Image (cartoon, rainbow, N blue to C red):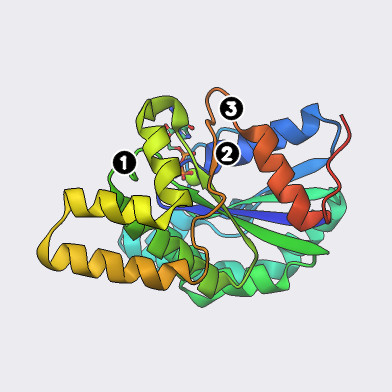
Amino acid sequence: MKTIFVSGTAGSGKSLLTSKLNEYYATNGAFAAILNLDPGVDTIPYTCDVDVRDYVDYVSIMQQYELGPNGAMVMANDLIASKIDDIQNDINKVNPDYLIVDTPGQIELFAYRSSGRFLVENISSEEKTNIFIFDGALVTTPVNFVSIALLATSIRLRLNLPAINVLTKTDLIGDKLKDILAWSSNLKTLENAIGKEADGDTYTLTTSILRGLNLGGFAQGLIPISNITGDGFVNLEGALSRILNLGEEIED
Ligand SMILES: Nc1nc2c(ncn2[C@@H]2O[C@H](COP(=O)(O)OP(=O)(O)O)[C@@H](O)[C@H]2O)c(=O)[nH]1
Ligand SMILES: [Mg+2]
């Protein structure tokens, strides 16, 4: 089994991408399954094969410990780690070729508290990778683009997994797509764009971050997709395959 974590800021399209990627694999004859790791989610756009909500009940945590929504969410996420054996058993019963993991709505709960990392390290799997989503609706200015790239780098540091950077919502951003792809592939173009948008401290800070990030080749190979039209999924599957299957693409 190979595991694909899907991470990104709240509302970036993690759940919808999880659902569409699962469909994509099924359509192409591969056996994929979904693990939902978000204990607080109400409705999700797929049927999950393994669901953390079977083990962690956010609403009863709120009532039992008299916590507000944020406190209960933190506690619910922390509790996930203690349920790893149950989750692993459920995964083993399904035993898919690809396990797609939809992570909690708030990325900081998954990436920065210890239970997310514990799960990433301890789910038993041949290969693992993390898709980090650049929300197409958020990265339409060069300074925002660099801010999200900084977050992507921080998450990569924290999860310690090979990363695939994906840009979602390409169906909504029109001509901006060209700009964003140019920024992600050429440092000079991005620096020039920052110069047009920002000055003073913002310019200095943004360009310094950028040079630091560039050491890791931060957003090169950003894969544009739309979860609505399905554009880009062929490229995404190819990138996943290069990491997970050492280049062997799924059969058509
Ligand atoms: N137009 C468009 N909407 C999207 C795309 N991906 C996600 N959305 C919408 O963005 C909202 C948040 O998506 P969701 O998958 O729940 O985000 P999550 O919080 O990261 O799991 C939903 O209304 C989705 O329908 C996309 O590629 N294009
Ligand atoms: Mg979600």
Answer left or right for 13 relative to 37: left
Res 142 visible = yes
Q: What residue is at 52 percent from the left and 64 percent from the top?
A: 217
User: Which dot, 3 or 2, sits closer to the camera?
Assistant: 3
Q: Disc 3 to disc 1, how far (Cα)? A: 19 Å
Answer left or right for 27 relative to 37: right
Q: Which residue is mark 3?
A: 231
Instruction: Please state which of residues 25 and 87 is positioned toward the viewer in this rendering.
Output: 25
**Circle 2 sits in a helix, a strand or a loop, which is it?**
helix
The answer to whether the beta carbon of the residue marked 1 is less than 8 Å from any atom of ligand 1 is: no
**Residue 121 drawn above or below residue 140:** below
Q: What residue is at 27 percent from the left and 45 percent from the top?
A: 141
Report the image quarter containing ligand 1. Answer: top left
- Pinpoint residue 98: horizontal percent, then vertical percent: 78, 49
| Residue 140, numbered label | 1
Q: What residue is at 86 percent from the left and 51 percent from the top?
A: 95
